[in-house]
Each structure stands twice: as structure tokens, then as C-alpha cells.
Amino acid sequence: MVFNSPTLSYSLLAPILIILGGALIGVLIEAFVGKARRPIVQLSVALASLVLALIQVIRIRELSSTTAAMGSVVIDGPGLLFQGAILIIAIISIFLIADQDNFTSSAAALPGSDEERQATQSGTVLTEIYPLTLFAVAGMLLFPVSSDLITLFVALEVLSLPLYLMAGLSRHRRLASQEAALKYFLLGAFSSAFFLFGAAYLYGYAGTVSFAGIHAAVVGGTGNDVILLLGIAFVSIGLLFKVGAVPFHAWSPDVYQGAPTPITGFMAAATKVAAFGAMLRIFYTVLAEAQWQWRPFFMVIAIITMIFGSLVAISQRDVKRMLAYSSIAHAGFLLTGVIALNKAGFEASIYYLFAYGVATVGAFGIVTLVRDSSGEVSDLNRWAGLGKRSPWVASAFAFFLLAFAGIPLTSGFIGKFAIFSAAYESGATAVVIVGVLSSAIAAFFYIRVIVLMFFTDATEDGTSVVIPSILTRLTIFISLAVTVALGVFPAPLLDFIKPLAIFIR
Amino acid sequence: MTSSLIVYLIAIPLFSSAILLLAGRKANKWGHLLGTLASASSFGVGAYLFTQMLAQPVEERAMTQKLFTWINVGSFNVDASLLLDQLSICFVLLITGVGTLIHIYSISYMSHDLDRRRFFAYLNLFIAAMLLLVLGDSYLNLYVGWEGVGLASYLLIGFWNQKPTYATAAKKAFVMNRVGDLGLSLAIMIAFASMGTVSFAGIEEAAPKTSTTTLTAIGIMLLIAAAGKSAQFPLQAWLGDAMAGPTPVSALIHAATMVTAGVYLITRSNFIFDAAPTAQLLVVIVGAITLLFGAVIGTAKDDIKKALAASTMSQIGYMTLAAGLGPVGYAFAIMHLLTHGFFKAGMFLGAGSVMHGMNDEVNMRKYGALRKFMPITFITFGLGYLAIIGVPPFAGFYSKDMIIETALNAGGIKGILLGSAALFGAGLTAFYMTRVMILTFTGTKRWDDDAHPHESPILMWLPMAILAIGSVVSGFLFTRGDALVHWLEPVVAAHEHGEHSELLPPIVVSGIALTIVLIGISIAVMMYVRRPVENVAPENVSALTKIVRQDLLQDAANEAIFMRPGQALTKTLIAVDEKVIDGAVHGVGAMAIGSGAGLRKTQTGYVRSYSALILVGAAAIVLGIWVITQ
């Protein structure tokens, strides 16, 4: 038997390889660099890898190839747009993650144990978070450019496993954090199993795991439709779990609440881009011809997701849980972009993902600032009157909320407008009507928070806004600037997306 | 032709405004200088572009500049582009020219105000917004400027908002303007829905193919917008209260420029109104009613600024009337707008100068005999006075005479009615302006004891003098060889020139107009020179006078027609909101939370139930597949 070594286009794979390299260096730093210097060295390495990867993505933006890694990875305009968006979100998030107050000093110690107390008192900080973040980013970069089911599954696991760990690293309320991590892991494993099950069906249907092969089989239409449908259904469950669509959403409020807030922001923003990136690729290219089979299901799921997310968010009393349900509602809005199945819908989805991701990181960045003596305060009642005490922080948060609500002159408006009009053009009128209605409901709970911050008198319980560190300030400022810019001048980004947003098969 | 300079007209004052607002108190020393310089530079750019236009052949004079693609979503494409044509250059020169003079005047007028820097920031903001309004090449760009001037007007009316009544006046102006703004946004929406474009050029092209009903609807909505911004009937009530702002603001915004934006809008939309006779007729009616309404109110005002404000309302009524008279009238509307810009701004500055010397007293019954103490103010104000009442050869004579003639020649009973209204208005104008002159500058002293009237410093009287020169010569210059009419022809009169039969020869019309003006002056002289003037308004007056003093009951009417029903409606809606909508929302929320085995219970916190939920979801999908494949 002859063994052929694989041919790899290193420059096209470089963004992923740089991040993986950075992560490995991070692991070595954990072993060889002294404790005192570790945080700054780790941050520099992580930031450098992310920036280098972004530069490489920009350099190769004109290129495209289906054979970058023996047909397992496809590099094209949309893939690079998703990679770019993930990297930008990761860069913004890394500053927030670098604010070590949010993480436990010793993840291995039992919550409340002497060991933990000693570690905290000795000033130990947890720097493993940087390589973990980079591993997750590498998985996310691979996810939307995978072009066979095996690579897709590997990418899914590479991005998920570090996130499970990172969710458990909160400094405050460590038990809740660990519980969240365990739940996320168990449910993630469960949905991965569904995904694999579906992948097996698709293999059974097409006789191959490559997207091109499956697409050819779908177009040929000779296989057994029931097997195709089951395959689509189970693969979709794996993906819908990651984006938090109903009824596969149950993990997200608990995990959003329990995880350290910077991780929640990063996860909410970047995972969504990666998962929707993969989903858009699969449904726009591989399964586009099978739309009569899957679109009705997606419409039902989108409708349930939007309504459920918006309605349940109303009754939340915790800001992180509220943002979690809001993110569920947004997953529903984004699903309308998948349903639209036209070029306008695809461009709108990319724009929406980027705009929403940036605003999400910014919003969670602000959540980290509102604290009392025992740590972050996420109880909404205690946010009352924040506008009077910290007008800048409250105004920034209000602006992010307005962007989520899709009020004109924020990025959210352009995204919603574009995505709904694309879905309307494709004939999904019912979904659009539900989307607009649930946007209205969603606006209610966003604006309720604004009213609470600015027009309600504060309760006397010593909630205060800490003075943000320079890093956190950077995160919030960049997110705010991008959100404003995309709201007022959406055209440059839309024009940038337009020529690139063409999948190759 | 394209030009990359147009944007600087707007960018310079906008940038200056931003600097002044951001710099804070640090800019107190030089803020007013920067503001004035910005306005003057903008005027310089405007003048240069004007000479460039003059150098071009007629059909290539319009210049455009594309700034960026503003919105590009689906079929909705709007560029942020600027259009400088023969119509907009008139406004550019008026806004920046008069604007600069008023900036200079304000340096001195506001010198004791601690917030002078902020005042100049708002003035610059206004200049930028107003220029955007007249330079936008589409209704949407115009709308941005339209809202911008509304904001600047609000900020400046309420500049002394430490007085609650002033803050209320600002709010009143803002709210009544919103009604008009709604008209504009509806017009834009109708235009987009029916023609798929919002640019002037696009709509002009599409108008002939559009049904008259649609065009009429757009026209009426535009008229509502114009009525709100230009204080025309029935949205006129805010202008008098807007006099709460500092006097330079009244001169610039509420006399010379912003309030004429409605006339600009109608003139700019000539392609819509020419094709929608019903809307055009409504424009004429609104103009005629307002010109009489304002003039009547003007006869009973003792507050010098409110008398001038009523006069502004009336004069804009003339412009609206002219604009409603179609292709022949547009140029005359713009001509009267420009001459009015000179003489009314000049008179407002004169009123400011009088107030400056009289401890901010505005009641004319407490003036008198100021001619000797303020000779320059008297002369400049007097030249403006001669211009507004239409004495030849002053500016107002030419422009108003043209409007009266055009109205008379409108044909049939319509022409006679409109012509009579315009003539009667001219008589009333002569009456109330003579009254202002007599009460302020002649007769006996009726001052309060602590008044020490004195002439204003040069920075204040110089702008007044320049505007007075404009009030004298501008009318002659505009009409010499029909200069302005020919200049504007490519924009407004490119359509068929309908030859109207002349009801009366022009010389006869002028004669009648002058006679009526003389009658108005004589009545005023009889009432206020022959009889002594009391320094408090007499109470034993006819019921009619009382009604006129209350602005013809405009506020009472608004309260009865809009406010009280509105409050009742609001109460009902609140009740509906609390009972029905909140009930529904809470009900739905409660359903989400509390429908027992429903949604909330899914969020138990137990992994086993979460995974069961996923399983149920998967099962439902499989069931669905089974159903559809059967």
C-alpha cells in the first residue's frame, strides 16, 4: 500500500495554524515562565496570534480554494468573512478576558476550601484561560470552512471542549459556575451525539462525508429521502444546540448566568458566528436543493425561538439571564436569514452576526463593571438608578440595548431590516411577521432596563460601578464605536460583504 | 458638473460647532470668534461657488457632489449627495451672508452672557443644518437638515431655559414642528412607495407617470410640512412664542432663514405641485389666510418682537401664496423671501438694539421718542420699514408688487379674491408697521425710570447698516432685466409658460397698492400720533380688539380642537393600555411564566430535563418527517 502525504496550502490554512501555534506556545509558557510574568506574556502571545491571524485572513481575502486541505477545508469569501468576524470579536474579548478579577485563582481547588483561599491570597492568577481561548478560536475558525462532516465534527469539538472548561472558572459563585460548566458539557456531548448520528445517516444516504458528494447526491435525488431527512434533522440538532434555538436552548440561560461574564460575552458572540457560519454553508450550498424538506422545519423552529426568547426574557430578573434569552431571540432572527436562502439574506446574516457579536461583547463588558462587595451584581432590581450614579456606563449599556432592540441609527436596525426584508422577498412572510412582532416584544424588555437605569430611584444596597481597567475600557469603547459606526454608516461594510459573499462548492 | 467644494459649506460650521460644544469653558475666550469665522468662511466658499456658477453656461450651472452611499439595502438606495443649483445658491448666500452678519452682531449682543460660546455653537449648528436642508439632493437628505434646524431652533428658543416660560415656548415650537415633520416623512414614504425613489431628480422624472391622486397626497403632506416649519395656518401658533429666544436668533432663524424653509420646500417640489392642482390650490389658500391672519395679529401686539413675528408670519404668507400660484409665482416667492431676509433681519436686529438700550424692555408702550437717542437704529429700522410696507424704490415694493400682480392675474374669481387679500394685507402691513415706528421712535417718552437709552456699539449697528443697504437696493437689483426670474428659470419654470391675461395693467396695480398703503399709514398716524399713547394697554376696547390681542384665539382653538380631545384620547388610551395591553402583555408574560407545565417548567435547572427536552424536540422533528413522507 502506498501512502501519499497530504498536500496542504499552508498560506490558506495559516490563520488556523497561527492560532493553534499560539495556543501551544501558551501551554509551554504555563510550564516555563515564572508566575509573575505569566499574565502579560500570555496576553501578548494571545493578542499577537489573533492579530497575525487576522492580518493573514485579510491578505488571502481574494483567494479561494476547495482543496486547501485535501478537500476537507474550503477557503472562500464567506469563510474568510466569518473567520475575520470571529477574530475581531476575539480580539475585542481578549481585553475583557485579561481583566483577571473575573476568574478563579485556582480552578482545581474545591470551592470554599483553604487551598482556594491560599491561592487567592498569594495573588495567583489563572493564565490557562489564554491558551484555552485560543484553542476555542481555532475550532471556531475551522468550523465555518469545513467541507466534510468529519472535519466539521472535529472543529465542533475543538471549539466546544475549551468552552466547557472556561465556563467553570468564575471567581464568584464558583459552585454555580461549575454546575454550569458540567451542564454545558453533558448537554453538549448529548447534542454532539445527535450530530454524529445525523452525519452517519448522511453518509448512508450519499456514500461520502464530503459536502460536494452529499450535494451531488441531493441533486441526483436517487437516494432514500427518509434517510436524507433524518440526517439533515440530526445534524441540524447539533448545530441548533450551539446557537441556542428552541427547543435546544435550555442550557444557555444557566450557562450564561454561571460562566464568568467575559467568557459569556465571548461565547455568545463568537460561537454564534462560527455556528451560523457552518449552518449557512451547509444549508446554502449542500442542502439548498433539498429546501422543500428542511425549510418548513426551520420556519417552525425560527418562529418558536423568536417568540419563546422574547416572551421569557420579559420575566427575567437577572441581567445575564435576560441577555441569554435575548440571545435566544436573536438566534431566531438569524434563522430567518438561513430560511431566506437568497443572496440578500446571506449578506444580511453576515452583517447581523458581526454587528450583534460586537454589541454582545460590549454589553457583557459592562455587566462586569456593576458590582458590590461580593462581586458582580446581575440582579436587575439593583441596577435601578444606575444612570444617575454612572451616567456614562449606563448610557453605553442603554446604547447596546437599543442596538439589540434594533432602533434606527444603531447597527441592530440595519441588520434586522436587511434580514427581514430578505426573508420577505423569499416568501417567508409568516416568519417575518412573527419576527417583527417579537422584535416589538423584545424592545419592551430592553427598554424596561433603560427605564430602570435612568428613571427609577436607586435602592440603598451599595451597588457600585467599579472604575473600569484600561483593558475593559478598551473592549467597551471599541464595541461602542463599531456599533455606532455600523448604525450610521452601514454602507461600507455592506458593500464590503457583497462581493465576498459567494460560497464556492 | 461636479464640485468637491460644496461639502465645505456644511462641514466648516458643523466642525466649528462640534469644537465649541466639546471644548467647553476652555473656549470661552475665543468661541465667538471661531463661530463667526466659520460662518464667514462658509460664506466665502458660497461666494466662490457662485462666481464659478456664473462662469458656466446656463444649462451646466447646477453642481453636484456625491459624499457617500448612505443606505443601500435591497431596493432602497440613497446616496448622501449635495446639489447646488440656481435655487440653492440663493439660499446659501442668504443663510451664510445674513448668518455671518448676525454672528457679528451677536458678539456684542451676547457679550454679557456667560454661555456665549454655547450660543455660537448652536448658531453654527443651525447654519450647517440649514445648508444641508437646501443642499440635499433628495427628500431624505433634506429631511436630515429639516430635523437639524428644528433641533437648533429648539435649543436656541430655549437658550435661556432657566425661565420656565421660555423652556415651554421651546417645547411648543418643537411639538408643533413635529406635526409638520410627520407630514414630510409621510410625503417621503408615499413618494418612495409609489415611485421607488426619494431624490428630486428621480421624482421629477417619475411624476408625469404617477397618478394625480398620489401627487396630490404627496403635495398635501408637503404643505403640512411647510406649514409647520414656516408657521403657516393652521400650524402658526408657535412663532410668537419662539420670540423667547435671544433676538439675533429671532432675526436669523425666525425671520430670515429657517421659517422660509417651507417656501423652499414648495418651490423645490414644483414638479409635484404643478401636476397636482388641488394641492396647489390648498397652498394658495393657506398662504392667503396666513398673510391676513398674521397681519391682523400684528395690529394689536405691544411686544415689539411679537409684532415683528406676526409680520413675519404674514410675509411668509405672501411667499406661500406666490409659490402656490405655479410656475409664474415661484421666482417671485423666492424674490420676496430674499428681500424679506434683508429687511426683516435688519428690523429684528434693530429691535434687539432698542432692547439693548432699554434694559431688555419689549413693550412698545414703554418706548417712545427713541429717534434722538438711537439715530442709527432709527435710520436702519426706518429703511427696513419703508421696504416692508412697499414704498418704491425699496426692496419690498418690487417683490410684493409682483406677488400682488400675479395673484390678481390668477384668473377669474380666484384672482380677484387672492388679489384683494394681498392688497388688504398690504394695507394692514402699512398700518401695523407704522404703529411700530410711531410707538418706538416718535412721540413722547414713556420709559420706565431706570431706562437710559443709548446707541448700540459698532459691532451691532454695522450689520444693521449692511442689511439696511440690502433692504434698499436688493429689490431693484433682482428685478432689473428680470435677473432673478431668469436665474431661477432652469429650476422652477422649465415647464410651459402659461400666458395669463392681465386683469389690470401693472402700473394701475402699483397705484392701487400704494393708495392702500397710504390709507394704512394714515389710519395709524391718526390713531397713534394725534392721540396720546398710554403706557399700559387700554382695557376698554372692543371685543374684536380683545380677540386680536389673543392672537385671534389661536391657542384657545388649538386647546379646544387638539389639546382637550387629545388629553381625553390619551386618558382613554392609557386606560386601554393599562387594562387591555398591559393585561395582555402581563397575561402573555404570565402565560410564559405561569402556565404550569408550560414553558417555565422547562427551565428546571436539571440536566436530565434539559436533555429530555432536546429528545422531545428531536422526536417531534422525526415525527414531522414521518408525517410528511407518508
Image (cartoon, coloured by chain):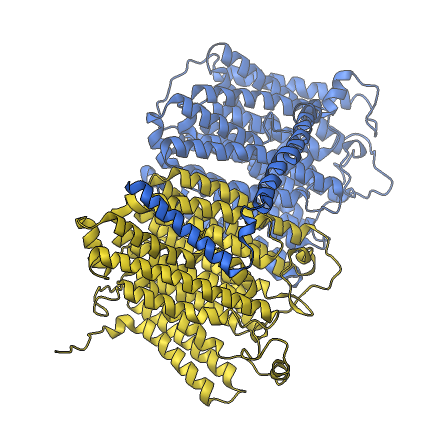
Chain colours: A yellow, B blue
The picture places residue B254, in percent across and down from the top left corner, at 61, 37
Vertical placement of residue B541 versus B618, above or below:
above
Q: Measuring 24% from the left and 63% from the top, which residue is drawn there?
A: A64
**A477 and B30: which one is in front?**
A477
Horizontally, is B372 left or right of B265 in the view? right
Horizontally, is A278 left or right of B15 in the view? left
Question: What is the quadrant of residue B538 in the picture?
Answer: top right
- Location of the N terminus of chain B (image quadrant): top left
Q: Is residue A71 visible?
A: yes
Question: What is the quadrant of residue A493 in the picture?
Answer: bottom left
**B384 and A110: which one is in front?**
A110
**A472 and B88: which one is in front?**
A472
The picture places residue A413, in percent across and down from the top left corner, at 47, 48
Horizontally, is A395 left or right of A132 in the view? right
**A209 and A28: which one is in front?**
A209
Which residue extends farthest top?
Answer: B413
Vertical placement of residue A466 versus A415, above or below:
below
The picture places residue A470, in percent across and down from the top left corner, at 56, 72
Number of callouts in the render? 0
The picture places residue A284, in percent across and down from the top left corner, at 29, 52
Which residue extends farthest right?
Answer: B449
- Location of the C terminus of chain B (image quadrant): top left
Vertical placement of residue B314 versus A49, above or below:
above
Q: Measuring 54% from the left and 64% from the top, which residue is drawn there?
A: A476
Q: Is residue B71 visible?
A: no
